[in-house]
Each structure stands twice: as structure tokens, then as C-alpha cells.
């Protein structure tokens, strides 16, 4: 049987039984839409998490911290020793002190940090409003400070833009290592708020490290970002630093673990959506079986005029594939449409309450292509049994069937 004959006969159902055909396609579409929507939710959640991570230098950096026992600490001598480790290209330390901040005549406790401009690139810290310190702009940033998002909550500020350009003052609380007493050190100058970072977990204010060191002696650093040359260098450098007694974490491993977790979540969501797809496939199988009974006489005539069992089998399977494929397209349209509508509704609600927009549902093109192909395969599987029954019918019995 020629291809054009198969195509013409396998699509004839849209003329002979259009209502039942489209209802079958819609049933397949609903099952496919459930899979598309739920897995799209998994992709969206994964994307929201990974968007908080800046790729590039961040994934080539090691986060080194002091051990809880403080047997060793991150001093300038230790950082110089780190620089001598093969494949270490740069180090960005962070100093941290408890402080009292005065902003708009209101005072509160805060953690005052001192960093260089390269720290932001290696730690994955970005500005949600304003800007962070930039390399080459050290002279301009000497009197600037960067707030975290959590700091805005301390002062009950809703609009981050209203903070940019405002002045603040600090008083540090420094522990004397010899006597153990805490001393209060006032920083004489005022600092101008330059930006709001994306850190929503800690109440911090960050000033240039050189400016902090000009006002107080830094005995050791709280942590440091150690940048390596290539991804393959992360493990050897990490092992060397751990041998020296420090705690080391890598963002690349965190990303890898997060991807594994979300793959599991997507699998679970796909199973729930697959249940609806199985129900739709059962309905399609029932439709194909009914079609077989209705067309038994037609099959007898086709066999009598020379159609082979293989031709009959090909005809029924092609009909099932067409229905499955179109069901996949319809389901993809329904699922993607629902996801986009929900994304729009959430972003409108977030904008009205001053929140950030997010894409909770995401649909990568390779995934959509796989779903379309998978729907056609499901149609193929549901049509195999009716096709075999149709091919096995005796031409004489088929003609007599009423």
C-alpha cells in the first residue's frame, strides 16, 4: 500500500466520525497536559533556585571558612600560603565584626563586613538595586556601603530605591584577644548607601576592606573565596586547604546536588501526570477497539480486493499514531498555556505587592519535543493490539460480520 493511500485512509476518521475522533484526541491531550504542566513546574522550581547562582567565576571558587575550634584562622599569612598552591589564581577575603548602625536616626545591631570588589564575583553576590563595588572603582567606593535585603527589614524599608544615596554611621564592637574584653570603636566618617545586595538571609552592611582596615586592625578574616583556574582544579585545591585545617565548600557541588534533587522532583511529578496519561491511553485503546468492530465489514472488502494483513495492520497503527501525535500537540498547547497564564497571574500579583517576578513554570524546547514524540509512541502502543486483531480477521468472516 502506497504512503499516500495510508495517509488518506488513516485520516478519513476526521470525516466519518469527527466528534469521536476529536474527543479521543482531547482525552489524550488532557493526559499529556497533566505531564507537561507538572514537569514544567519542576523545571520552574529548578530554574528559580539556579538563577540565584552566578555562573562562571562563582563555580570556579572555593568558600574557605575558619574551623569552629579556631585552631587555625584565615590570616594574611595563611592567604599568602593559599596563593602558593598550584592553580590558585586569586583570593578574596571577608572580614566581619558586630556593629551598631545608625540610619535615619534609628540604630540597630548589624554585622559589618569588609571585602574587596572581586569578592562579589566569586561569591555570586549581585545588586538588586544600585550597584556593588567594581574593580577599578576603589577610590570612588571608599565611602560607600552596600546593604543586604535583610537589612532593609531591620529598618522596615519597603522600597529599596529610597535607601540609595542615604548616609549611615557605624560603631564597631571589637574583642580584645589578650583581655577578652569587648571595646567599642567609632568610625568617624559617614558612608553612603551604594546598593542593595541579593542576600536575604543575613542582616549585613558591607564596606571596602581597605576602609575597614584603615579604622581597625583585622586579626583574621571570617572567610575567603579562593578562585582556581579550571573546574578540574577544584578538588585538588580543596583537599590541600582541608589538610591545613580549614572548612571548604564549593558551589559547583551544591549545584550538582540541587540538580539531582530536582531531577527526582521532576520524576515524581511526571509519575503523577503519567497516571492521567495512562487513563487517557485506556480511553484511546477503547476507541480503537470500537473502531475495529465498526469497520469489520470494510476490512473484509479490503482483504477481498487484495489488501494484505500487513496493509490492514499498517492502517490501524497509523490511525493510532496520528491520534496520539495530535493529542500530544493539543496537550502541549493546554499545558504550556496553563503555565504561561499562571506565570502571568503570579507576576501581576507580585508586582502589585512589590515582589519580584518569577517564572514558576518553564518548558524547555527539548522537553516539549520529547513529549510530542512520546505521545505518538503511546498512540502506537494503544493501536498495536487492535491492529493485530484486524489483520488476523478472516476476509469471509469479516464480510459476513454485522
Image (tube, helix red, strand yellow):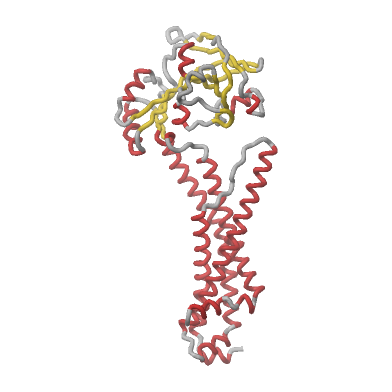
Q: Is residue 372 left or right of residue 231?
A: right
Q: Is residue 350 above or below residue 392?
A: above
230 shown above or below 79: below
Q: Say whether residue 38 is left or right of residue 260.
A: right
Looking at the picture, how far across and down is residue 366, in whole percent?
49, 55
Q: Position of residue 132 (x, y in %)?
A: 52, 27
* Residue depicted at 36% across the width and 22% down the height: 79
Farthest right residue in view:
352
Q: Quadrant of the C terminus?
A: bottom right
The mark tally for this picture is 0
> Quarter of the image holding residue 401?
bottom right
**Can you say whether 51 is above or below 79 in the image?**
below
User: Measuring 55% from the left and 68% from the top, which residue is drawn there?
Assistant: 324
- Taking the view exactly as shown, the residue that stands out farthest to the top is 179
Front-lying residue, 316 or 381? 316
Q: Which quadrant of the view contains residue 194?
A: top right
Q: Position of residue 10 (x, y in %)?
A: 55, 77
253 and 170: which is toward the camera: 170
Q: Position of residue 368 (x, y in %)?
A: 53, 57
The image quadrant of residue 145 is top right
In the image, residue 233 sits, relative to residue 302, either above or below, namely above
Which of 256 and 289 lies nearest the eye of the viewer? 256
Amino acid at each position: 500500500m502506497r504512503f499516500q493511500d495510508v495517509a488518506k485512509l488513516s485520516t478519513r476518521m476526521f470525516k466519518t466520525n469527527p466528534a469521536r475522533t476529536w474527543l479521543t484526541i482531547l482525552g489524550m491531550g488532557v493526559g499529556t497536559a497533566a505531564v507537561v504542566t507538572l514537569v514544567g513546574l519542576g523545571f520552574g522550581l529548578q530554574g528559580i533556585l539556579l538563577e540565584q547562582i552566578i555562573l562562571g567565576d562563582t563555580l570556579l571558587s572555593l568558600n574557605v571558612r575558619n574551623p569552629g575550634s579556631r585552631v587555625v584562622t584565615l590570616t594574611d599569612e595563611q592567604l599568602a600560603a593559599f596563593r602558593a598552591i598550584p592553580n590558585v589564581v586569586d583570593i578574596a577575603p571577608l572580614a566581619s565584626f558586630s556593629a551598631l548602625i545608625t540610619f535615619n536616626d534609628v540604630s540597630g545591631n548589624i554585622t559589618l563586613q569588609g571585602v574587596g570588589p572581586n569578592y562579589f564575583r566569586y561569591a555570586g553576590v549581585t545588586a538588586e538595586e544600585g550597584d556593588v563595588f567594581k574593580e577599578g572603582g576603589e577610590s570612588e567606593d571608599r565611602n560607600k556601603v552596600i546593604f543586604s535585603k535583610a537589612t532593609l527589614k531591620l529598618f522596615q524599608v519597603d522600597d529599596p530605591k529610597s535607601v540609595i544615596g542615604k548616609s549611615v554611621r557605624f560603631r564597631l564592637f571589637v574583642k580584645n584577644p589578650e583581655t577578652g574584653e569587648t571595646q567599642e570603636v567609632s568610625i568617624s566618617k559617614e558612608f553612603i548607601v551604594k546598593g542593595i545586595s541579593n542576600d536575604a538571609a543575613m542582616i549585613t552592611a558591607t564596606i571596602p576592606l581597605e576602609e575597614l582596615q584603615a579604622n581597625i586592625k583585622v586579626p583574621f578574616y571570617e572567610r575567603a573565596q579562593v578562585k582556581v583556574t579550571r573546574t578540574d582544579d577544584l578538588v585538588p585545591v580543596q583537599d590541600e586547604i582541608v589538610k591545613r585545617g580549614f572548612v571548604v565548600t564549593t558551589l559547583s557541588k551544591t549545584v550538582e546536588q540541587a540538580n539531582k534533587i530536582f531531577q527526582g522532583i521532576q520524576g515524581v511529578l511526571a509519575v503523577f501526570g503519567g497516571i492521567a496519561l495512562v487513563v487517557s491511553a485506556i480511553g484511546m485503546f477503547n476507541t480503537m477497539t470500537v473502531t475495529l468492530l465498526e469497520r469489520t465489514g470494510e476490512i473484509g472488502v479490503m482483504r477481498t480486493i487484495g489488501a494484505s494483513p500487513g496493509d490492514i495492520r499498517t492502517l490501524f497503527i497509523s490511525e493510532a499514531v496520528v491520534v496520539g501525535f495530535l493529542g500530544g500537540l493539543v496537550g502541549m498547547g493546554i499545558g504550556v498555556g496553563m503555565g504561561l497564564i499562571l506565570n502571568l497571574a503570579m507576576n501581576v500579583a507580585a508586582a502589585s505587592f512589590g515582589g519580584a517576578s518569577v517564572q514558576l513554570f518553564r518548558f524547555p524546547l527539548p522537553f516539549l519535543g520529547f513529549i510530542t514524540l512520546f505521545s505518538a509512541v503511546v498512540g502506537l502502543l494503544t493501536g498495536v493490539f487492535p491492529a493485530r486483531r484486524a489483520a488476523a480477521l478472516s476476509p469471509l468472516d469479516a464480510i459476513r460480520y454485522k
